[in-house]
Every structure is written in structure tokens, then in C-alpha cells.
Image (cartoon, rainbow, N blue to C red):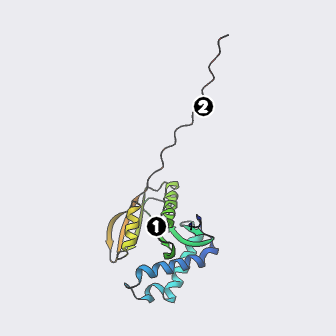
């Protein structure tokens, strides 16, 4: 059985419910057993997440990308792509599609956004006990840069696009002897 086609696109406000669902399912996998569920999935926290995601979608200061399969959102990323040191604020993949290439494809789209904005360094914070996420980011080229309480900070030196060679005018046709 083949995996349905993956599409990465910019989010719209109509995507908010599906994004929030992915966010809640992903957070439950890495916070479960470490934090009280009220902290990451209580009504006040879910509303805070929803409001923040809605604001990011309509903001000019954030980019929100969605990964979709069969028109269903299976991952999303919220990033800044305006200046060096900008952040990957959220990066979540639905646990049902882990290990399908969805995270790698979404991460590549984030890198393309940073490259287009000429961002040289990006940063993120990841929950320290989330070894799976830390290993994923390391495979993508992120390096640990420090710790802040229960989070690890990481940075990525964004690979820059190669300079485009100058476009040369075609050589004139050699003259024919008369």
C-alpha cells in the first residue's frame, strides 16, 4: 500500500481546527508522563494555543506551513523568517504519520522559507525529555546550543542557496568566409 501524496502549503484561517487537533495530539505524546495533563491540554491551555495559532496565521511576522495528505492536515510549522536568529516556534507532526517523511518534508519547506528570506541562523526550543524530537532536529542539522529549565535550545545554520551564475548572452554565430 502506498503512502498518500504529501503537500506542503501555507495555512489559512480555515485550517485552524485541524492544526489545533494535530497540536493537541502531538503534545500529548511528549508531555504525557512528564507534566499534568491540565498544563498541556486543559481548556485554558487549548484556548491559548488556538488564539496564538490564529494570530500566527494572519500575522505578517510569522509563516505557518501545513503538511497535508488527502486534504487532511497531518503536520504544521510556525516560524519567523524575517531576520537572523528567527525561530521555529512550533513544529508538530500527527503521531499517526510519524516515520513517513512528513516531518522531513515540512522541515525542508521551513528551510526554503529561511533561504528565501536570507536568514542565516534559525533557533528553536524543544522539551528536554523529548528525545525523539531532539534526534529528529539533529538529523536535520540542528545543534544543541544550551538549556533553559526543562527545554533545550538549538540552532541551525541555514544552508544558503548557491549563487546563481551570471546569465551570459549567447555567443554570436561564427562568421562564414565568403
- Quadrant (top left, top right, bottom left, bottom right) of the N terminus: bottom right
Direction from residue 97 to residue 128 in the image, left or right: left
Query: Which mark, by number, is residue 151?
Result: none
Query: Which mark, by number, is residue 88?
Result: 1
Figure quadrant of residue 84: bottom left
Packing grade of label 2 (10 A; few <14, some 14-19, many >=20) is few
Q: Residue at x 48, y 86 (%)?
A: 41
- Quadrant (top left, top right, bottom left, bottom right) of the C terminus: top right
Q: Read off the residue under disc 2.
A: 169
* Mark 1 vs mark 2, CA separation in Å: 42 Å
View extreme (front): residue: 1
Q: Residue at x 60, y 79 (%)?
A: 17
Q: Secondary structure at mark 2?
A: loop
Q: Where does the image place residue 136, in percent across and percent down from the top left? A: 41, 66
Q: Is residue 136 above or below residue 128?
A: above
Q: Residue at x 41, y 84 (%)?
A: 32
Q: Nearer the viewer, residue 169 or 98?
A: 98
Figure quadrant of residue 177: top right
Q: Where does the image place residue 35, in percent across and percent down from the top left? A: 39, 85
Packing grade of label 1 (10 A; few <14, some 14-19, many >=20) is many
Q: Secondary structure at mark 1?
A: strand
Direction from residue 84 to residue 75 in the image, left or right: right
Q: Is residue 176 above or below residue 144?
A: above
View extreme (right): residue: 178
Q: Where does the image place residue 33, in percent across and percent down from the top left? A: 38, 85
Q: Nearer the viewer, residue 24 or 119?
A: 24
Q: Is residue 41 above or below residue 112?
A: below
Of mark 1 and mark 2, the one earlier in the sequence is 1
Q: Is residue 152 above or below residue 172?
A: below
Q: Where does the image place residue 81, in percent across and percent down from the top left? A: 50, 61
Q: Is there CB contact under 8 Å for labels 1 and 2?
A: no
Figure quadrant of residue 171: top right
Amino acid at each position: 500500500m502506498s503512502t498518500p501524496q504529501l503537500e506542503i502549503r501555507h495555512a489559512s484561517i480555515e485550517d485552524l481546527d485541524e492544526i489545533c487537533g494535530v497540536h493537541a495530539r502531538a503534545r500529548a505524546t511528549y508531555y504525557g508522563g512528564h507534566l499534568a495533563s491540565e498544563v498541556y491540554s486543559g481548556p485554558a491551555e487549548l484556548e491559548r494555543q488556538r488564539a496564538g495559532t490564529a494570530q500566527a496565521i494572519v500575522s505578517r511576522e510569522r509563516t505557518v506551513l501545513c503538511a497535508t495528505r488527502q486534504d487532511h492536515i497531518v503536520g504544521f510549522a510556525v516560524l519567523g523568517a524575517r531576520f537572523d536568529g528567527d525561530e521555529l516556534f512550533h513544529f508538530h507532526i500527527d503521531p499517526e504519520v510519524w516515520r513517513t517523511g512528513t516531518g522531513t518534508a515540512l522541515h525542508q519547506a521551513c528551510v526554503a522559507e529561511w533561504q528565501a528570506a536570507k536568514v542565516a541562523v534559525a533557533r528553536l526550543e524543544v522539551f528536554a525529555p523529548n528525545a525523539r524530537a531532539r534526534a529528529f532536529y539533529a538529523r536535520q542539522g540542528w545543534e544543541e546550543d544550551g538549556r533553559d529549565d526543562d527545554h533545550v535550545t538549538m540552532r541551525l545554520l541555514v544552508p544558503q542557496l548557491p549563487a546563481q551564475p551570471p546569465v551570459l548572452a549567447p555567443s554570436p554565430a561564427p562568421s562564414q568566409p565568403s
